[in-house]
Image (cartoon, coloured by chain):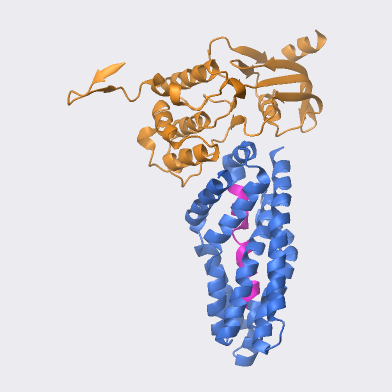
Chain colours: A blue, B orange
Amino acid sequence: MSAMALFAREVRLAWAGGGGPAGPAAFNLAALALAPLAIGPDAETLAAAGPGIITFAALLATLQPAERIFGEDVADGTLELYALSGVGLAIASLMKALAFTLAVFWPLPALAFLGGLAYGLEPVSALVLSAGLLLAAPGLALVAAFAGALAAGLKRAGLLIALIAAPLQVPLLVFAAGAGRAAMDGTPTVLPNLMMAAAFTLAALVLAPLGAAAALRARLE
Amino acid sequence: MRVRRRFGVWTQRQNRPNSAAMSLPFPTASDRATVRASSVTLSRGGRTLVRDLNFEAGPGDALVITGPNGAGKTTLLRAIAGFIHPDGGDIHIEPAVTGRIAFLGHADGLKPGEAVRDALSFWSLLQGVDSAVVEPVMRRMAVAHLENRACGTLSAGQRRRTAIARLALSNASIWILDEPTAPLDAKSRARLADLIADFRASGGLVIATTHAALDWPDQTQLDLTEAATAARVSA
């Protein structure tokens, strides 16, 4: 009950605060719009690069607001209150990361589908890519939250978050993009890629909150 | 006290300080807690702030920690709350149950975009306190008229009163307060003193730091000045 109350509050705060989903969505769209200007107008090249660019743009979009996930709680004293609340920092971190995924990162799979179509993927391939990102998005957010917890309250936390989170997000990037590419090429590795993306999200679901809680506990000292 | 309203209806005065005392989630006999510090030494940034400190505070007590800036008041409070591990000695809270401590630090723990009522309703829900208590607590700390205001638009004193209302909804048996009266006017200080008196009467334990005179009845003062520390250590 307490954990659900915390989840509901964090969804509300994440939706309303800092522009909600608008910032990451705009960042994602800008990356998708600018990449073809660098790659060139060749349709085949764009379609081949599409799954990778689209997933990479989504990854960057999850890093953009990561500083907010715990930084504000450290600054306004909420972190101390959560630590003493009896819910526990690991559960609080999990609820915050999931709430952030739901409230802020929900456009990413939809943008992946639209981006896939724009880059010349078949609708089915774009849909598979979108499904890959749907499975990877919670994992990306959980890793970003873990990095956000490590850097919470520090100056230039954004840079540190990118350095910590990006390498840990690589498997999710590889398998989400891999699913889209496999669908595009007609190879039978669509399902294994999707399942691997889901597996890494599940691993992040277990490990990232524990790491975030340890980092936040150290931050309280 | 009963007052006659404009339309002749007899009703309870809404802002009467004690009107909500019976319904607040204050400790019951089984919830009461004791804090015991044994030979506690604390340091920050390589400097020893507190040496060989011993004290015990139990249900109904008010321990007021005083001392100049940098004497270690906040460090000691954070150690009691469990955020900091002492360099020496230990601090025991009995019985050890999570969710027993309510904390009011320098920051008020409020979100700028959240309305006062939403914030207090959330904290009551998180601590398993009946949401019907939110209204009387808001009245008691004189924030009922601010219920729809975003916390970010409140004055420092209004934010502090809202944070104190959160304490009263915490279902905790120990309140740890860091400079609780700093931004409060005289009327608000009296409201806080009144709330704390009721909390202590229910068996609650209050540990607070202050630079101002709190004048809570039967309070125990813990002086962290260097001279007091030296006297304690040599005794």
Q: Measuring from the top left, give residue B20's x and y in whole percent.
A: 41, 24
Left or right of B90: which side holds B28?
A: left
What residue is rendered at 57% in x and 41% in y?
A: A76
Q: Quadrant of residue B118?
A: top left
User: Is residue A150 a member of the stretch shown in magenta?
Assistant: no
In this view of the protein, which residue sits in the foreground, A43 or B228? Answer: A43
Residue farthest along the top direction in this orientation: B235
Q: Measuring from the top left, give residue B60's x and y in whole percent.
A: 58, 15
User: Is residue A69 a member of the stretch shown in magenta?
Assistant: yes
Residue farthest along the front direction in this orientation: B30
Magenta segment boundaries in residue numbering: A54-72
What residue is rendered at 60% in x and 15% in y?
A: B61
In this view of the protein, which residue sits in the foreground, A104 or B124? Answer: B124
Does the image show residue A159? no
In the figure, A27 relative to A49: above or below? above
Q: Measuring from the top left, give residue B106's x and y in whole percent.
A: 58, 32
Question: Which quarter shows the C terminus of chain B?
Answer: top right
Query: Magenta stretch: dominant SS?
Result: helix
What residue is rendered at 62% in x and 87% in y?
A: A47
Residue farthest along the left direction in this orientation: B7
In the figure, B57 relative to A37: above or below? above
Left or right of B15: which side holds B66?
A: right
